[in-house]
Amino acid sequence: MVRSVCIHGHFYQPPRENPWLGEIEIQESAAPWHDWNERVAAECYGPNGAARILDDEGWIRSIVNNYSRISFNFGPTLLSWMERKRPDIYEAVLRADGLGEARFSGHGPAVAQVYNHMILPLANRRDKETQVIWGMEDFRARFGRDPEGMWLAETAVDTETLEVLAENGIAFTILAPRQAAAVRPAGEAGWTDVTGERVDVFRPYRCSLPSGKSMVLFFYHGGIAQQVAFGETLRNGNAFASMLLDAILASSAESPLLSVATDGETFGHHHKYGDMALAYCLDRLERSGRVNLTIYGEYLEKHPPADEVRIVENSSWSCAHGVERWRSDCGCSAHSRPGWSQGWRKPLREALDGLRDTLSPLFGEEGASVLPDPYGARNRYVSVLPGRKSGNVREFLEGEAGRPLSGEELARSVSLLEMERNLMLMYTSCGWFFDELSGIETLQVMAYAARALELGERLFPGRDFRAFFTRKLAEARSNIAEFRDGRRIFDIFVEPLRADLLRAGAHFVVSCLFVPGEQKACSPERCAFSSYRISGCSLERKESGNNRYALGYLRIMSEATFEEDDLFVAALYRGGRDVLCGVARKTAGADGNGVRERIEAALRDEDEQAMVDFFGHNVYSLRHLFKDEQRRILTLIISEDVAAVTDMLRKTVRDYSEVLSFLAALSMPSPDAFRSAAEVVLNDDLRKALESLPLDLVFLERRVTDAETWGISLDLESLRHTAARRLEEFLDRLGDAPGDRAVLGELHALLAFLEKRKWEVNLWEVQNRFAKILSGIREFSPGTSETFAGVAAMLRVRSESGDSDFFPPSPSGRNSGK
């Protein structure tokens, strides 16, 4: 009897981009990372592409790509972010699918996912179809093949959803055991009730559909999945493997399949080192000879289902009440506090449903004036979303229209499609999953709704789409008294996100005041940002006394909607946080005689009233900049002051260093003022020493010794980060020239320092790069073998740790996994 094990990882993050910018702005709750995508990528997605298997001595025996040995799906919106921001991890994911095809009889381990994690049983038929089509087309574009299976958001299912999957050629999906209602052997009349998780999960089933089509359903092992996700299973990879072996060996099914499905983030993000436990488990299962590692497509080809199943309609894996978690206060919550209610879920969904049901029919009517098949065009619009470029969108729209389009027709058509895209993004499931209306996930779906609403108001002026929407939001009560309700939350947190061409122009000109270097002119390429493009610029930056200002003309375009305008802009920086900016359309008289000269005089004279009189309501400050640039500029503004204060403190510490040492020798505490000054100075000195060229280890040692002697706390989190970046820099240089004894020596010396001081730097990326360099060396350069051995010992890397599943070939762009 052949016994098989399949572990499925559902890797997904909700889309987090600002709907107006197309970029994720900084999320403070993810600190020290920029945002939650960055954090989870560092803790989970990257480590699973280069997971360690350790030997009995704790050395790295092998570095493996976990994705190539399991079944997995990645959310399309997450992959889109990953392609732009973490191409190294993206390439590992694509490569894993190709490696898996060779391992699993020609079946790739990647499974498609409905596009933006919409709960399909709560969606209308048209949105179900688009979500499935977009998920499949995104999959084809990335993995270079048709998907065999598709992951449903929260495994939420109804018969209509299965019909849509079947109509589009999907062969199977994966459900929780409680989603099976009844089973019977094929061809028999009687059904056996299996509700309450009594279905035999060790075999696949065929679900016959009203259309005459069918869908294969795999039910994962609920008990094991629960232990993996929420128990202690991932503390030990050997115990994980034993649990799986015990379960599959106990099954009496013919050629049984043990399927375990869980959030992919379980392996590293929710459970630290879960990626290593998974790698060790898979390695032990493969070596055991008692089971086969497989994936659903391979197993289905070899073992077609012999039994039929009926599903529990409107059911899911994370709500005991079906799909109520996404539309009512059903009692399911994440970490709800006593007295908190999720009664806000119902009015929030009603607000979004009302917006969709009002705007979508207008899309069909208005879109047909340019696009003969507007809803078909909506389904095909996904083809230009990955790596979106305005030229591709124009070509797509004119292909759909069957003729050249005017600028106005292009802008209107793409605005309609963007309205529809945001109407779908606003249903991302995470908006209802957690406990509080003001959580970042719920704010995100509100932001997509706000963008759809804004586009609708612009496309159909005179129509009131806002009244019902805001009235329903007002019925959604927050658990936090100061936020009151959804309407107030919308006004406080969502409305300020809105951007238009004027605000984008203000952002650009203020940024130009703070470009590095001495260049006075502002380059559109250097200052380009997010979804806006500067196509023409006659902007100049000048200085007057202690002030600097910029003024001139811009031509700016939204890459998302093709709207464009010519703007007259002026900005003044008077030191500190004092920034004033004005923006006006040229058509509003901003290109008249003497305007530029008059505004330049106002800038020189710091005549704020003249600016306000001319620009009216379109006057901006640092508050109106988009978050990341706002932080960058504020950091620049205060950096000189911080450096000056640090230099003054450095003189104090230098003058009183003997006093600090004397007090320490007598075991007397130093005064708080001295200790605080020393803490600032020593941490600053250590950061600079770690970045110095060449590396100044003597100074590093001396300053660490001073800190120990004087009892000064070090900012180890920041210093570890700086040290890791310096090590990676050495590895980059060593990769280009493995025989460079100077670089190798510095690498060895810094590692020795860090090991001696027990700083516990995150060496994950350093180990990856070193193992790759080591695997490529056929013969050591004279005098380097011992140093390489020393570095390997400190990194705990075996010379044979290279693994073809981990080390990719030279980057070759999209579909490199094929």
Image (cartoon, rainbow, N blue to C red):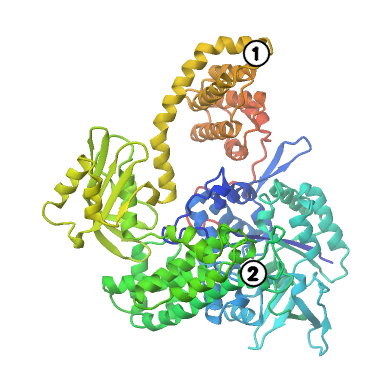
Q: Disc 1 to disc 2, how far (Cα)?
A: 60 Å
The quadrant holding residue 436 is bottom right
Label 2 CA crowd tier, 10 Å (few <14, some 14–19, many 20+): many
Compared to residue 612, the image places residue 139 above or below, namely: below
Q: What residue appears at the point 56 percent right and 81 percent down from the top-left corner?
A: 125
Check disc 2 and report its element: helix, strand or loop.
Answer: loop
Residue situated in front as seen by the camera: 50 or 662: 662
Q: What residue appears at the point 65 percent right and 13 percent down from the top-left corner?
A: 664
The quadrant holding residue 188 is bottom right
Task: Name which of mark 1 and mark 2 comes first in the sequence.
Answer: 2
Compared to residue 539, the image places residue 205 above or below, namely: below
Q: Is residue 353 left or right of residue 621?
A: right
Compared to residue 54, the image places residue 647 above or below, namely: above
**Which amino acid lies under the numbered mark 1 shown in the image of this protein?**
Ala
Q: Which residue is mark 2?
A: 343
Task: Return the residue found at the far left.
Answer: 593
Check disc 1 and report its element: helix, strand or loop.
Answer: helix
Q: Position of residue 443 (x, y in %)?
A: 53, 61
**Which amino acid lies under the numbered mark 2 shown in the image of this protein?**
Gly
Q: Is residue 714 left or right of residue 414?
A: right
Q: Position of residue 264 (x, y in %)?
A: 66, 57
The quadrant holding residue 347 is bottom right
